[in-house]
Amino acid sequence: MTEDKRMYGHADDLAQPNELKYVGHNVPLHDAVAKATGKIQYTGDMEFPGMLYVKILFSPLAHARIKKIDASAALALPGVVAVFTHANTPETLYNSQVWFAGQEARADERLFCDTVRFVGDRVAAVVATDKKTAAKAVSLIKVEYEVLPALFDPEEALTENAIEIHPGGSPFFEKEFGCGITSETFNKAELIVEDRVETPKIHHAAMETHVCIAIPDYSGKITIYTPCQILYSVRLVVAKVLRLPYNKVRILKTPMGGSFGGKQEVTIEPLAAFFAQATGKPVKIEYNRQESIISTRTRTRTIGYVRTAVDKNGKILAREVKAIVDTGAYTSNGSVVSMAMGKKIFRLYRIENQVFRVQAVHTNTPVAGAARGYGSPQIHAITEINLDHVANRLGLDPVEFRLRNLVHPYDQDLSGGPSLGNARIIDCVEEGAKLFRWQERRAQANGNGSGRFRRGVGMACATHSNGYFGAFQDFTTMTLRMLEDGSMILNSGIHELGCGTVTTMKQIIAEVIDINPDRIEAPEGDTETSPYDVGSQSSRVTHICGAGALKTAHKVKEIFQREAAKILGCEPEDVVMHAEIVWAKSKPEEKMTYGEMARAIQRKNRMEIIATETYQAADNPGSYGANFVEVEVDTLTGLVRVIDLLAVHDVGKAINPGFVKGQIYGGVQMGIGLALSEDLRIDPKNGKVKGDSFARYHLINAPDMPLVNVLLIEKGGDLGPFGAKSIGEIATCPTAPAVVNAVNQALGTNLTTLPLTPERILAALRE
Amino acid sequence: MELEFKVNDKAYSLEVDPESRLLDVLREELGLTGAKEGCGEGECGACTVIMDDLAVNSCLVLASQARGKEILTVEGLAANGELDRMQQAFIDNGAIQCGFCTPGMLMSAKALLLREPNPTEEEIRTALAGNLCRCTGYVNIVNAVKDAASAEETEGSV
Ligand code: FES
Ligand code: FES
């Protein structure tokens, strides 16, 4: 493998030159050739002998009790193997987002329930020998419903006489935490600026829809092929529903056709597993686009009320943030995401008096869940739009205002969370403003003229986590061995989501062992054979798993040197390992390949070069980012064009700068969608999703996408491998508020309800 | 209905339902699973193949419309084992992440170069307007197409 010099040649190349051989270099994605040739097999491409296909009947009503299901016509259709409903499936209640055994979470979901709670809830399923028959049979199922009153508005859920979607009603979760004394401080403030900001439900829009295959065997074991983010979460939920011991449920991670959190929670796997168990046949469930949009998971709709108090010098004295979190019809991650949102607001600015209050509610709408940023894009939209409003009212430049308040490296989290680590947000803002020519462009744009097209320039900041340390258990275990030809295998519970995790692990190991990354295999996780891992979530993979790979590689190196020393007749520290060749420092003429040495060690020392190590997370620094953006608003049509965007990110160290930039480009695409066009648009009359297809749900496409420049701040300083911090989630967090702030500058408005659709923009202009 | 057509330079004669979609014929009858279904309604481009030199959404083409046509799928790009320039450019430019949009992107980009060997950036973006990608923000995809086009040009002038 050689690094292609042309790689990313068009993108600005701002990576620092370094002496590392593999880390910090643009090693190509390990499966890029398989993907470019169409040879890679995604789950939808896989077939197994005798496999059955599923079509699910989804509720057309937002809230109803099922009185009767008549499946006789469906069952009579040749090729139909079974029809499943609430009457013949387990009553076990589960929660789709638990990822470790013993995790407390409200369990209110069932495979099929006798009450449907949103348009898109599961009513029944046909399992048949082919897809067409399954689809035909589903249309023959007759259901009698008793319609129940429904509610779609999260604020209505908090009113006195709101209906109860689950026993106890809403809020089903409430929390308040903070630091300092807010109420008194507000009384002393020079200026208080309040806003209500709203973010919509959005669809993750992975190009691959939800799909999985479950295969039963003669021993009662169920094997599941799934493009998931957390193997051990799938195992937990499936084992619970099927009442199987964990070792009778085997989960295999298949190639991921995109997730962004959409496949993080356990949605279709327990269904496929149960159908496979019941029929004794392999079963595939593959959703179409509409089904993925309405019936899996969405980003959590969030309404925020912010009050920020400042003095006349632009110092933030106090802030109150109240969030209403709409988790939809089932609890899912409603409480966890509520907490995740709150924690972020204490980690970006030095605010001594601050309180966060959150209420999570159920509505008769599609279920929310994990979504890239896990609440960060929402909470940052809420607070960063408000901060621009504050800056405007103070007559202060938004960059200057932020610089007066941003956190400094190694600040403490005043709400009691882990240290912020080497938090370099000030560098991001200062260097970004310079590179973007902020002052000049901001002054120039400024709503420019009163013609049809108005320009605006805006920016926003954000922070995100690096794993679960300080909140939940976080560690990883890995086994690394060297084979008799000098090649290596990493056995771990990693998940490749297309971000480059496999290659990243290889680069880290390659750096320690001094071996070509192509000589390392790093298969993705398999719950039967891989050690435990917490999963691809919480922006932990590079920071935590990467540190695990580093630790394990060092251990293997130590073993190799110790054993090689016996062969070479020298001290372990005198064993030189260089480019897959090994020798004793004192005898450079006697060289052996790693493979020759591994064989000699087996023969003479009767030892294998293998190590299993557990890395325990011990820090959780903030990853930081700032976006600077220029937009042009067409005041006639209300359409916004994002002209160009600069994304500056404090990533500690980019293990693979190309991958890091890839994450940022994709994150920006998603963030612009959140700002301008993406919204499930739930009909307030009947709860139907209006944006239930790509024809009616607008993703940013190639012509919409602006120029994106990236500046990476790489100052290390924390416990990640080579100082690396997360990028995948933070990449999307600053974008939406930066775009909104730019539009507000262009129009002199204070638009706060996302997305800024043409209708909303035109309405604001009319005011 | 009998469907006679050529796929990746190979002639086929198949018995298919005239209502079946070209995408299903390719994936299910011929085992060519490179083309993907991302929406089934002509909005995402994951199913793009080239039919008589034009990029088409194979989820919208009926088997009957493919009669007598020449189809090129992603599997046909590296027919003799050597990667097509466009494939190499996607790999070199980091234009592939999850890869689910990649086959469709490659075919749309390839069709563009067939009709316009030296496209402007705007033409590239327009040609890819019907191909959605959630991973890459299109940045490196556009770079890859530019790269492949300039490589093609250099080659042409030699
Ligand atoms: S599957 Fe054909 S365009 Fe989406
Ligand atoms: S690479 Fe994942 S959708 Fe394009």
Image (tube, helix red, strand yellow):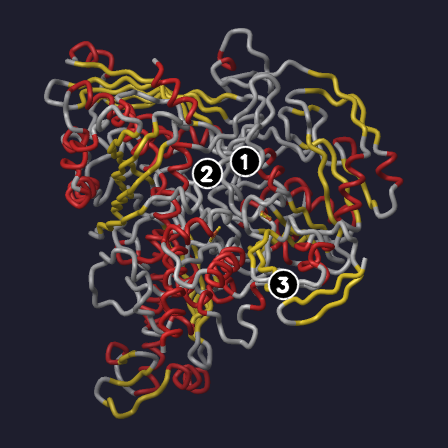
- Tell me which amino acid carries mark 2: Ala
The answer to whether A462 is drawn above or below residue A534 in the figure is above
Please determine if labels 2 and 1 lie on a single subunit: yes
Element class at badge 1: loop
Q: Counting residues from the N terminus, which is met first, the one under dot 2 or under dot 1?
A: 1
Task: Say which residue appears at 67% left-offset and 46% top-offset.
Answer: A285
The residue at which mark 1 appears reads as A297
Q: Kindly identify which numbered label has been placed on residue B71.
A: 3
Element class at badge 3: strand
- Tell me which amino acid carries mark 1: Arg
Which quadrant would residue A174 be assigned to in this image? top left
Measured Cα–Cα span from mark 3 to mark 1: 37 Å
Q: Left or right of A629: which side holds A610? A: right
| Residue A330 visible within the image | yes
The residue at which mark 2 appears reads as A371
Whether the residue carrying mark 2 lies under 8 Å from ligand 2 is answered with no
- Tell me which amino acid carries mark 3: Ile
Q: Residue furthest left?
A: A313
Q: Which quarter of the rendered picture does the C terminus of chain B lie within?
A: bottom left
Instruction: List x then y, in percent, for residue A327.
Output: 51, 27
Element class at badge 2: loop
Contact check, label 2 and label 1, Cβ < 8 Å = yes
Q: Chain of mark 3?
A: B
Task: Say which residue appears at 81% left-offset and 28% top-offset.
Answer: A142
